[in-house]
Amino acid sequence: MARLWSCGFELQSITAGVEVDTIVGQASISTTLVNGGGASLHTKGTVGPAYVTQQFTTTSATNNVYVRFYVNFTSFPSANSITIALIRSAAAGNNLTIRCNTAGTIYLNNEQTSTQVGSTSSAMSLNTWYRIEFSYVYSTGAANAYLNGTNFATGTASTSVITDTAWFGNIDANTAIALNYDDIAINDQTGSNQTGLPGAGLLLRYSPNAAGDSNGFLTQVGGTAGSANNFTRVDEVTPDNATSYNASITAASDLFKVG
């Protein structure tokens, strides 16, 4: 499939392994400043790292990469050329980054050669949500970046760079910048749908708030007793894992859980 990974931080957790692989520094969840749904990732406006990382494919991946994220700045960086997103791998190091300047402009940078790719964007405003996208073609090194769907950077990066992991946030530890991230999506070119830029989109989480029309589990485990209360075991944000859940054993070797 083409959609490799997406995250809207709707589970409202910064525990490693819940929504992202790792959380570094002062990254936190915001429920007051969101692009869609009920939460976003916030990075504090103080000096020090505040970012998350996610491996979205195997460490030997040679596919194209198409990244989307929404960002809202409450303060621009205190220095130019600050990395706010990147794609990389342990094998090849950093590949491409989105970097931000003090004026609120962004540009695409080839980290393999430490050179800018294409032009710099128009200036953004504080306290406004923007959709940023960038892409990388493995075979040719073709690289592009977009601001609200407008292509501002076109060029060629290094070819045949393995790319399997993305980072989002204030990645440069010595610079203050405050911004929120939401509705991240990453595609490759395989499959029949979502084989290019993700485009505009929101990531929402729905959970039950009352008993449904059917409570089909014969055996309930955890939470309040009684089938009418099944929904109370699967409605929590952030999920409590195995503390509350529904389970039904239909045969000695058949166990099914929802939690």
Image (tube, rainbow, N blue to C red):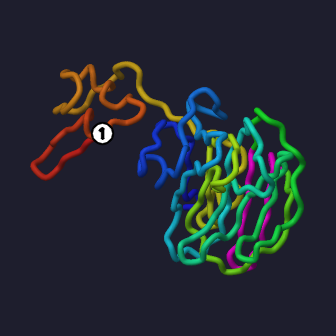
- Helix, strand or loop at label 1? It is strand
Give the residue type that dot 1 points to: Val
Q: Is residue 50 above or below residue 144?
A: above
Side (left or right) of 50 relative to 135: left
Q: Residue 45: percent from the left, percent from the top?
A: 66, 40
Which residue is at the front of the view, 171 or 117? 171
**What's the residue at 72%, 49% (across, down)?**
199
- Location of the C terminus by quadrant is top left
Q: Which residue, given by chain and number where applicable, does mark 1 sit on?
A: 258
Secondary structure of the magenta portion, mostly?
strand
Q: Residue 153: percent from the left, percent from the top?
A: 85, 61
How many neighbours does mark 1 have within 10 angstroms: few (below 14), some (14-19), or many (20 or more)?
Answer: some
Q: Residue 35: percent from the left, percent from the top?
A: 66, 34
**What's the residue at 48%, 36% (across, down)?**
12
**What's the residue at 46%, 55% (across, down)?**
21
Is residue 169 found inside the magenta-colored segment of the image?
no
Q: Which residues are magenta?
A: 131-149
Q: Is residue 93 above or below residue 175?
A: below
